[in-house]
Image: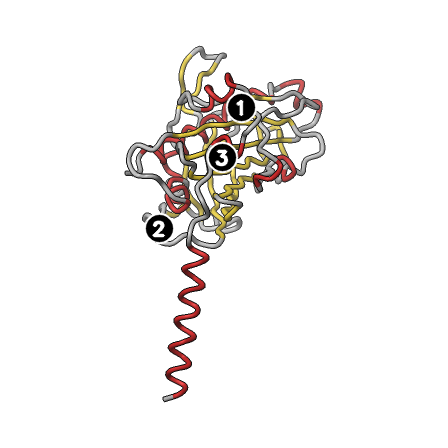
Amino acid sequence: MLLMVLAKKNVLVFSLLALVVALPAWTRSFDDIFPGLDVAKRGMAFSGEGIIRSLEKGEIPELNPAPGSGINLRSRITQENAYLTESLLVVPYSGRTLTVLDAYNALGKVRNLKGRLYHSHTKNAEIPLFEDATRLEGAKRTGAIPDPPQAAVLPVSESVYIRLKDVNFGNSYYRADITRESNGLLYSLTNFKSLTYLFFPVMKEEKFSALLYLEPLSEGMLVYSIAGTEVSDFIASKIDIPSAIGKRLAVFIDWVAEGIKEIR
């Protein structure tokens, strides 16, 4: 009898601990995270299209969260000579205030990356950047699997493997590591296979990183990101790398924003 009572108490204690862990932190405002951002950039972040800046080598990012915010994506770009692109967007809530779990579910619809358009200057037309998009079993077992149903519980962490049929680079393979970060969710995308262009290697594995941070704010869902890639000087002389990164990050941001808007 005593053992049963103790067991019930332990279950209660663990349940309370799980509840405490699951409780969201206090909801921050945009100005809590970006207190020094000028009025023009703040307006662009709330404009619907957001800000996307492609930087040249050595150029310093301008969209920097406050030091005490707990958000420091720049330090996670490990490439020494990376071309960087930064982005900032707040997606307004269309109904109820959203949660970190909602952010996670918005990121789960990998197949919705397929067919998203970008403007091709060479063709002077809007064309799909990714002709196909699918989730994979893993890095070595690359069979296609369907996107999962909407989750009811937020996992502590997760790795998702993705194949994108890129209009320029053909089949490209990425690993997305999803973890809790500060008051939100970090989606870290890295290529786990080399990218090629017309059979020439463009980017070695693990040389592209896109970090997307999502946090439910009082004004809407924050989508803040930095992407970086490292390529040889020869490749950089043949391909406009800042433009290539910017277009792909823009498509990912659009995918995330649409997923958030669909949540009611």
The residue sitting at 58% across, 21% down in the picture is 54
Residue at the image point whose x is 47% and y is 25% from the top: 250
Residue at coordinates 35% horizontally, 50% vertically from top-left?
151
Query: SS of the residue at dot 1?
Result: helix
Q: CA distance from mark 2 to mark 1?
A: 30 Å
Foreground disc of the pair 1, 3: 1
Q: Nearer the viewer, residue 175 or 168?
A: 175
Q: Which mark is residue 246?
A: 1
Q: Amino acid at mark 3?
A: Asn
Q: Which of pointers 2 and 1 lies earlier in the amino acid sequence?
A: 2
Q: Quadrant of residue 1?
A: bottom left
User: Which one is nearer the viewer's eye here, 144 or 31?
Assistant: 31
Counting residues from the start of the chain, the first of labels 2 and 3 encountered is 2
Task: Say which label, 1 or 3, has the lower sequence index.
Answer: 3
Q: Is residue 211 left or right of residue 127?
A: right
Total residue callouts: 3
Mark linked to residue 171? 3
User: What x and y, as percent, mark residue 221?
Assistant: 41, 35
Amino acid beneath label 1:
Gly
**In the picture, which quadrant includes the C terminus?**
top left
- What mark, if any, has residue 151 been given in the picture? 2
Q: Is residue 212 visible?
A: yes
Q: Are marks 2 and 3 in contact (CB under 8 Å)?
A: no
